[in-house]
Image (tube, rainbow, N blue to C red):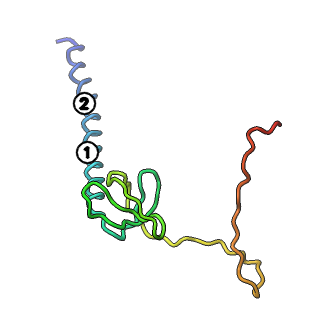
Amino acid sequence: MDLGSLLFPLLLVLLAVPLFLSARKQKRAMAEQQQLQNSLAPGDKVMTTSGLYGTVADASHDTTIDIEISEGVVTRWLRAAIREKVAETEEAVVVDDKADEDEEPAITAQVAEPLDHNAKK
C-alpha cells in the first residue's frame, strides 16, 4: 500500500469528527431552547430575540405567548421569539447629590445632541 491510500481515510475522519461534534452541540442547544420556551409561565421576565424585555402575561397558547412590555401594554409573540429568561433587577435612578436638602433630589440625565449630517465642515 502506498502512503496516499492511508492518508485519504485519515483525512476523511479528521473532517467528519468536527462536523459530528458541531451537529451534536447544535442539537443540544436547540433542545435547551425548546425546553425554555415550553417552561414559560405568567410572571416570568423574558427577553425576545430582538432585545425586547417584558413579563409573560399569558402562556396558555401552543405557538404564541403574551408579553407585557409596559404596564397595561400586552403584545403577542411567537414562542420561538423568546431568547431567554432574565433575572429580576432593580432599575437604577441617578440622583444629584448636590441638590439642596430642602428641595427634592434632582434626577439627572444626559441627552445626546442630534447629528446634522448635512452640515458643512
| Residue ID for mark 2 | 16
* Amino acid on which the number 1 mark rests in the picture: Lys
For this rendering, which residue is in front, 65 or 10? 65
Three-letter code for the amino acid on which mark 2 is drawn: Ala
- Horizontal side, residue 2 vs residue 74: left or right: left
Q: Is residue 1 above or below residue 97?
A: above
Compared to 10, does 104 lie above or below? below
Q: Toward which corner of the image does residue 9 lie, by quadrant?
A: top left
Q: Secondary structure at mark 1?
A: helix
Estimate the x, y position of residue 62 in percent, counting from the top left. Answer: 24, 57
Q: Nearer the viewer, residue 95 or 2?
A: 95
Q: Residues within 10 Å of mark 2 (few under 14, many from 20)?
A: few
| Residue designated by label 1 | 27
Judged from the image, the secondary structure of the residue bearing numbered disc 2 is helix
- Nearest to the observer: residue 19 or residue 114: 114
Relative to 8, does residue 96 appear above or below in the rendering?
Answer: below
Q: Mark 1 or mark 2: which is in front?
A: 1
The foreground one among 18 and 120 is 120
